[in-house]
């Protein structure tokens, strides 16, 4: 086997995936424990925790890494929607030690309508979890983007389940935006960190295109504002690419 093919086989192996997940989980713990954190908007989470019904936690794809840490902010079961992509599976295994459970599926790619990504099954599982009182985390601009543009799927989920959406974000004073489609934010240890929860957005009362679009725009603005507040609290210029 040529060296290049052997290297690719090793990198795609189950061992490499487990190693990557362990390293990611260790890094999340390091950043969390070696930084000072403050939670802004905690009252919004507490109000939703007091309800029997579940709620949807929405955050941008590029702020994915530290979200497992907020699992401790609720006594409810917490699920996360992930795609079947290998990188997403690694992130899922990294978050599992924090008590996060997963629902595997993805939105359909309009360019590949014949490719089943488990979207219908995932939707049914999310609706059931929400009606059972759990929290379901989603990245409404993932897994393909465009970055920081809410797709309508999360609004339809809220409508079907009758669940409110909690817009969330986090930021740290030290870190770097990576050169990826979403400009993934990699936080650095020894930071000042901030989690931000915005006011919940109620589900649309009907599934009309107008009602879905109204809530979609509202969620997009709320997520942008939560991210702006988190970055401002951390002393980080929006989109600034720096470590310290």
Image (cartoon, rainbow, N blue to C red):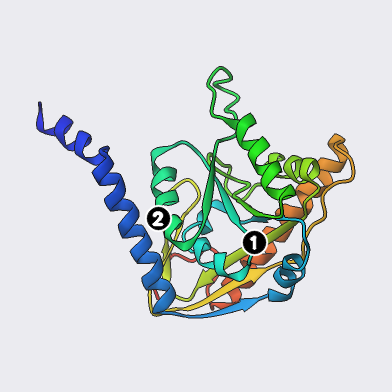
Residue with the most extreme right position: 205
Q: In the picture shown, does residue 145 fall above or below 98?
A: above
Residue 155 falls in image quadrant: top right
Q: Considering only vertical position in the picture, is 240 above or below 219?
A: below
Pick the quarter of the image with the N terminus.
top left
Determine the secondary structure under disc 2.
helix
Q: Position of residue 229 (x, y in %)?
A: 64, 72
Q: Could you tell me residue 129's position as x and y percent?
A: 67, 47
Residue furthest top in the image: 114
Task: Quadrant for the C terminus, please.
Answer: bottom left
Circle 2 packing at 10 Å, graded few (<14), some (14-19), many (20+), is many
35 and 56: which one is in front? 56
Q: Residue at x 83, y 47 (%)?
A: 214
Instruction: Give the foreground label among 2 and 1.
Output: 1
Q: Which residue is mark 1?
A: 76
**Helix, strand or loop for disc 1:** loop
> Can residue 5 be seen by looking at this rendering?
yes
Residue 123 numbered mark, or none: none
Q: Which residue is mark 2?
A: 94
Mark count:
2
């Amino acid at each position: 086997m040529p060296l290049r093919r052997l290297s690719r086989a090793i990198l795609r192996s189950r061992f490499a995936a487990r190693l990557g997940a362990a390293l990611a989980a260790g890094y999340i713990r390091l950043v969390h424990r070696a930084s000072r954190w403050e939670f802004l908007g905690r009252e919004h989470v507490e109000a939703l925790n007091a309800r029997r019904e579940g709620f949807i936690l929405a955050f941008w794809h590029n702020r994915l890494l530290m979200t497992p840490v907020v699992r401790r902010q609720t006594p409810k079961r917490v699920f996360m929607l992930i795609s079947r992509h290998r990188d997403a599976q690694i992130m899922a295994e990294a978050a599992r030690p924090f008590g996060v459970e997963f629902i595997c599926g993805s939105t359909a790619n309009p360019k590949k309508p014949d490719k089943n990504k488990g979207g219908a099954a995932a939707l049914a599982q999310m609706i059931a979890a929400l009606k059972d009182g759990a929290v379901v985390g989603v990245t409404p601009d993932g897994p393909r983007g465009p970055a920081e543009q809410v797709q309508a799927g999360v609004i339809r989920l809220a409508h079907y389940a009758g669940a409110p959406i909690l817009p969330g974000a986090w930021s740290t004073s030290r870190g770097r935006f990576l050169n990826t489609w979403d400009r993934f934010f990699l936080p650095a240890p020894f930071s000042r960190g901030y989690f931000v929860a915005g006011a919940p957005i109620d589900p649309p009362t009907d599934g009309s295109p107008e009602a879905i679009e109204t809530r979609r725009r509202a969620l997009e603005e709320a997520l942008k504002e939560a991210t702006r507040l988190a970055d401002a609290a951390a002393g980080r210029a929006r989109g600034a690419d720096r470590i310290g």
